[in-house]
Amino acid sequence: MKQRVFFADEQTAIAAGYRPCAVCLPEKYALWKAIQRKENG
């Protein structure tokens, strides 16, 4: 990867528009995706 961005915590990253990695963190990604579906209809 050429560009990597680090945050102090998960909440800050999500607030900045980032999401959990689907490869590295599949459970957190699935939860994030489910929340997005609920919020966006």
Image (cartoon, helix red, strand yellow):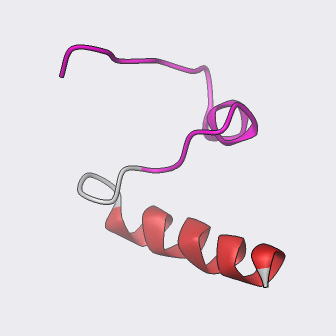
Q: Main secondary structure of the magenta part?
A: loop
Residue 12: say if magenta: yes
Q: Considering depth in this image, is 19 or 27 the residue closer to the camera?
A: 19
- Residue 19: image x %, image y %? 53, 48
User: Does 14 sit above or below residue 22?
Assistant: above
Q: Quadrant of residue 9?
A: top right
User: Does 41 sit above or below residue 29?
Assistant: below
Q: Which residues are magenta?
A: 1-20
- Residue 21: image x %, image y %? 37, 50
Q: Residue at x 21, y 14 (%)?
A: 2
User: Does 39 sit above or below residue 3?
Assistant: below
- Residue 27: image x %, image y %? 41, 71
Q: Is residue 27 left or right of residue 39?
A: left
Q: Quadrant of residue 33?
A: bottom right
Q: Residue at x 57, y 21 (%)?
A: 7
Return the residue found at the far front: 41
Q: Quadrant of residue 32?
A: bottom right
Q: Is residue 38 left or right of residue 24?
A: right
Q: Is residue 4 left or right of residue 24?
A: right
- Residue 38: image x %, image y %? 76, 83
How many labels were placed on the picture?
0
Q: Where the N terminus falls, by quadrant?
A: top left
Q: Residue at x 24, y 57 (%)?
A: 23
Q: Where the C terminus falls, by quadrant?
A: bottom right
Residue 6: say if magenta: yes
Q: Considering depth in this image, is 3 or 29 the residue closer to the camera?
A: 3
Q: Considering depth in this image, is 17 or 12 the residue closer to the camera?
A: 17
Q: Is residue 13 left or right of residue 26?
A: right
Return the residue found at the far left: 1
